[in-house]
Amino acid sequence: MTLDPGGLQVLVSRLTGVAEEMGAVLRRAAFSPNIKERADCSAAVFTADGTLLVQAEHIPVHLGSMPASVAAAISALGSTVAPGDQVVLNDPFAGGTHLNDITVVAPAIDDDGHLVGWVANRAHHADLGGAAPGSIPADATEIQQEGLRIPPVKLTPEVRALVLASSRTPQERSGDLDAQVGANRVGVKRLLALADAPFDEVVAYGERRMRAALDELPDGTWTFEDVLDSTGAAPDQQRPATIRLALTVDGEHVTFDFTGTDQQRAGNVNAVEAVTRSAVSFALRSVVGPSIPASGGALAPVEVIAPAGTLVAASFPAAVGAGNVEVSQRVADVCLGALAQAAPDRVPAASQGTMNNLLVGGSGWVYYETVGGGQGARPGRDGMSGVHTAMTNTKNTPIEALERAFPMRVSRYRLRRDSGGLGAARGGEGIERDLVMLEDVTVSLITERRVSRPWGLDGGGPGAVGENWLLPGGDEARAERLADKCTLRLAAGDVLRMRTPGGGGWGPTC
């Protein structure tokens, strides 16, 4: 069956609608503010052999790596699944990203027993055990310290009980898992209604679009490198680490070669290969064609070389909690920096380059959030201010929701003036926020761009670095600058101030 262009667009839209509806069900049914309010979740649809078919416009770092999770689920259990089964996993070394991101995969099997395809969703669970509340301890040196690691297994009552028992917040985990299961059930129903559609046409269309877009770029090789400020909280981890890239365009084919990137470190700022591929996919589609469907076909002309054992393809038993959130941001920056040389009129200056991860845990509760900052200026257009950028596409947690759910109070929340880089187009402004603790808590900060600055392009200036501060008892006179990555105890009345980076400027100031 071959579709005309109009019919193909209708099919792509209907399939994308399946993923979008899955995401809506997940958010509305979830218990945690992290999923319900921040939308830290994603959904996608796959063919019977596990090829990405469509995805919703959710979290880039989730979506680009999700095919690896589906492949792991199929490899482990594909021949044994039955209608109604759900496969759960979070193992970064078997298709996952970091342990907080639980992926649930379900087969779509029709009444005749024919496998039509797969649906999957991924959600960030606020706590799955580990050495500190939030399961991303800043001082982790191996993955066992980061919480429960789940290989691909069927989500049975026994497995569910194990997940809940591992968490400091089991009731919340139960509700969020139920929401993921419900989202997949809706996805399976909707996908089965399209069982007779030519899914291979959707995959082939994505490949045609990507090849045509690559063919418009000049052939050549361009290099770029950037740094991570540190790889963990320990003194020996407080030194920069470098990610290097050689980008080669050859007709309708492109290669992203990360050879020369520093080796993985003892800290938790290491990314598994699936995360790196996700950042490559985001950067490439952003530059050459944001409207290109994000199917497996679109990545067919793309080769990624990520040497095993490096920061961008970490090997077991590396801690990887911050690889998903921080290394992914720097990989995206490096890819965009190289692409700016091939297509200078399409690429913005560097955005804030961090997710500004904040984890707070008290008695029976755990809070997780990423905080927005400045977007890099674009050719002829200022960057946006106070937004999530690059590999995160979450929302902010509304003050009302935060204060209702957790014993904290927001005493200051505003744009950080003059933090954006100067230029013909200015970088976006970061955010300044003060959180007052209403009880004794454990806090972990996982942040970047506290030393290195988001770079400008074409003569534009860099954005301001971020800052983390502790105000004991709220006293400005006793303010203490905190490291970019740390886990510490705060007392009731203490204030945590975060000032996030601004985006780089674009073009020389007139």
Image (cartoon, helix red, strand yellow):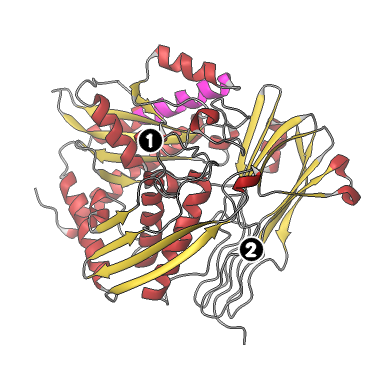
Q: Residue at x 27, y 56 (%)?
A: 303
Extreme-bottom residue of the structure: 510
Give the percent coordinates (x, y) of residue 380.
Answer: 52, 78
Q: Residue at x 30, y 46 (%)?
A: 54
Q: Residue 159 is drawn in which quadrant?
A: top left
The residue type indicated by label 1 comes to Phe
Q: Which residue is mark 1?
A: 93
Q: Residue at x 53, y 49 (%)?
A: 326
Q: Of callouts 2 and 1, which one flags the residue occurring earlier in the amino acid sequence?
A: 1
Bounds of the magenta span?
Answer: 170-184
Mark 2 → mark 1, Cα distance in angstroms: 34 Å
The residue type indicated by label 2 comes to Gly
When the figure is inspected, residue 62 is found, relative to residue 367, above or below; the finding is below
Give the percent coordinates (x, y) of residue 70.
Answer: 30, 35
Residue 290 in view in this figure: no
Q: Which residue is mark 2?
A: 502
Inspect the magenta stretch and tell me whether residue 16 lies in it. Answer: no
Query: Quadrant where the C terminus lies?
Result: bottom right
Assess whether mark 1 and mark 2 are in contact (beta carbons under 8 angstroms): no
Q: Badge 2 local density, few (<14 within 10 Å), some, or many (20+)?
A: many
Tell which of 63 and 219 is nearer to you.
219
Give the percent coordinates (x, y) of residue 47.
Answer: 22, 39
**Tag 2's secondary structure?**
loop
